[in-house]
Amino acid sequence: MSNGLHAEAIYMFDDDSEEKRFYSLISEIRCPKCTSGSIASSDVPVSRDLKQRVYELIKSGSSNEEIKDYVKQRFGESSDYKPAFDGFNYILWLGPFIFLALLMTIFYSKRRL
């Protein structure tokens, strides 16, 4: 019978840089089950498992990019709070500015007429 309480996992690191990497990474990975929030702030089972996997990957010597790629392969691009600035993302980032410039051009050209 479960009482709903879960023990907080204890992560042992060799040095402060590993610990900082871990907490930085888990704050950049979106919780797959939550509507918003990172796995750092979530206690759902999938987030606990993912935190454990990130810990194991850090301990095995994986780079931050390798860890993020691992998560993206399993949960998709939306799992990363810091998406890559390439491909379709250019349109998402630059689209509003292009649209605004187009509107301003139309507005000023109509004022001259």
Image: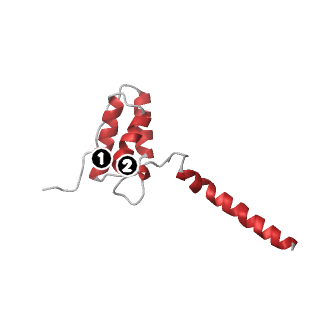
Q: Position of residue 81 (x, y in %)?
A: 47, 49
Which residue is pictured at 33% across the width and 34% down the height?
Answer: 57
Q: Position of residue 59 (x, y in %)?
A: 33, 29
**What is the quadrant of the N terminus in the image?**
bottom left
Q: Position of residue 35 (x, y in %)?
A: 39, 60
The residue that label 1 is drawn on is: 48
Pointer 2: residues within 10 angstroms few (<14), some, or many (20+)? many
Q: Residue furthest top?
A: 14
Q: Earlier in the sequence, mark 1 or mark 2?
A: 2
Q: Amino acid at mark 1?
A: Arg
The residue lying toward the viewer, choosing from 86 and 23, is 86
Left or right: where 102 falls relative to 78 = right
Q: Secondary structure at mark 1?
A: helix
Which residue is pictured at 31% across the width and 51% down the height?
Answer: 43
The residue lying toward the viewer, choosing from 98 and 17, is 98
**Quadrant in which residue 60 is drawn:** top left
Which residue is pictured at 57% across the width and 56% down the height?
Answer: 92
**Quadrant in which residue 10 is drawn:** top left
Q: Amino acid at mark 2?
A: Ile
Query: Is 53 placed above or below 91 here?
Result: above
The residue lying toward the viewer, choosing from 110 and 18, is 110
Q: Residue furthest left?
A: 1
The residue that label 2 is drawn on is: 39
